[in-house]
Amino acid sequence: MSQQTTKKTAKLTIGDRELELPLIEGSEGELAIDITSLRALTGVITYDPGFANTASCLSRITFLDGEKGILRYAGYPIEQLAQQSTFLEVSRLLIHQELPSQQELRDFEAEIERHTMLHEDLKRFFGSLPKAGHPMAICAATAGALSTFYQDVKFDDPAEQRWSAAVRLLAKMPTIAAYSFKHSKGQPFMYPRNELNYCENILHMMFSTPCEPYEPDPVVAKALDLLLILHADHEQNCSTSTVRTVGSSQANLFASVSAGISALWGQRHGGANQKVIEMLISILEGKRTAKEFMKLAKKKDSKVRLMGFGHRVYKNHDPRARILKKACDDVLERLGTRNPLLDIAKELEEIALEDDYFVERKLYPNVDFYSGIIYQALDIPIGMFTVFFALGRLPGWISQWLEFNRDPTNRITRPRQVYTGSTERDYVPVSQR
């Protein structure tokens, strides 16, 4: 991917030496200082824990402005996609950075349908894992195991083979996710039904049994489709940068995505929506009011943490949270259910938006705050919340891996460090210590 270098430069002064560094300008006007030659010219490196101010790549996939609360996939606002698109259409958009024609979308959906089944030997792989194992661990292991069934998939494959691997992964991950749930329940695995759409098929494989007929609720399937769209990509987050980092070693797509699933599993990342539900349940069962909880959340020594508020990137409202807030009401109304956790959540949000402590710290509700409530309303078990996050993020991981692969200037990821250990010293034999 070619760099959009401007004529502008940034000046850096190190001691009595002044250096001019080129600036790169993105399509939305953001500027980045190109420091690729800094160490070679000066022997100096930059220090940026968590890479919060470091661009690791040039990308055409997702634009995010945390200050303004903007999220766009390949230029298309998330609000429009959430209202008008489908998850599979968004998946193809992210991979190609263009919306498909009607025929292209039909062909893509047909390709997905043809690859939903797992190899029978891979099905037996689940039996070797403990039933109490976390579904994310099972999904990560199984995604990696796909490499043993498709050994012809390599990093430097021709484009059509990389596309085939991407389709297989998108098609088979819902089956893998559903089987991880069935395995934990000791229930028989259900084969996919290709007459169902993507989200209907997920629900069928999770909740149907051979004993009786099951037809997925279209309201539930539509709500699930929305959740997957909102999670589809989010710039260079922890799991996405992990997929790129592993892919930079020329690991294949299955191995790279397996690493991404593991990165997403952590409670600082994908596990946050589960923590939100656990927080709301603790308030409900602890006979503690929302006001009492928020009062404790402001005290450093209380050990009470407010989950689902604030974001590493967004310093404004998370646009996905706004969409899900409305979706919460719509889904619960259409399902004819009432969730006391939603009432608590709304009260927490109201308090946070009016309390100077939270306003000054820009602690607005994020996507995790409402997604967990919707998952629970859809009867998705808490242990599966992060798995569905992974299903949603899958097209983003694939798109980022493919983009890195296509970039002729790509390099293996290798951050520098500032060493703070002992200086040189002599070895002392163990008998003299």
Image (cartoon, rainbow, N blue to C red):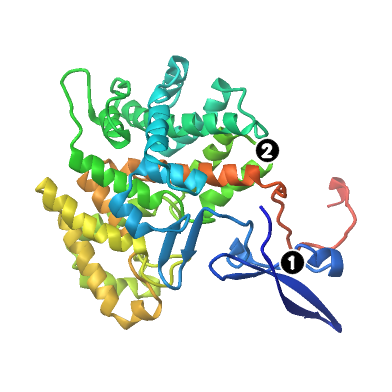
Q: In front here: 202 or 418?
A: 202
Q: Amino acid at mark 1?
A: Ile
Looking at the picture, how far across and down is residue 386, in whole percent? 38, 45
Lower sequence index among marks 2 and 1? 1
From what the image shows, is residue 88 above or below residue 29?
A: above
Q: Which residue is mark 2?
A: 250
**Residue most toward the right?**
426
From what the image shows, is residue 361 above or below residue 76?
A: below
Looking at the picture, how far across and down is residue 135, in whole percent? 39, 36
| Residue 307 visible within the image | no
Q: Residue at x 26, y 69 (%)?
A: 349
Q: In front here: 135 or 92?
A: 92
Looking at the picture, how far across and down is residue 96, in whole percent? 51, 44
Q: Quadrant of residue 191?
A: top left
From what the image shows, is residue 80 above or below residue 259?
A: below
Q: Residue at x 68, y 38 (%)?
A: 250
**Residue most toward the left?**
336
Secondary element under disc 1, as helix, strand or loop, is loop
- In the image, is 272 to the left or to the right of 330? right
**Dot 2, crowdedness within 10 Å: few (<14), some or many (≥20)?**
some
- In the image, is 219 to the left or to the right of 177? left
Looking at the picture, how far across and down is residue 30, in whole percent? 57, 70
Q: Which residue is mark 1?
A: 35
Q: Is the residue under label 1 in contact with that under label 2 (CB below 8 Å)? A: no
Q: Quadrant of residue 156?
A: top right
Q: Quadrant of residue 380?
A: top left
The span from disc 2 to disc 1 (Cα, nearest Å) is 24 Å
| Residue 291 visible within the image | yes
Q: In front here: 266 or 119?
A: 119
**Dot 1, crowdedness within 10 Å: few (<14), some or many (≥20)?**
some
From what the image shows, is residue 397 above or below residue 425?
A: above
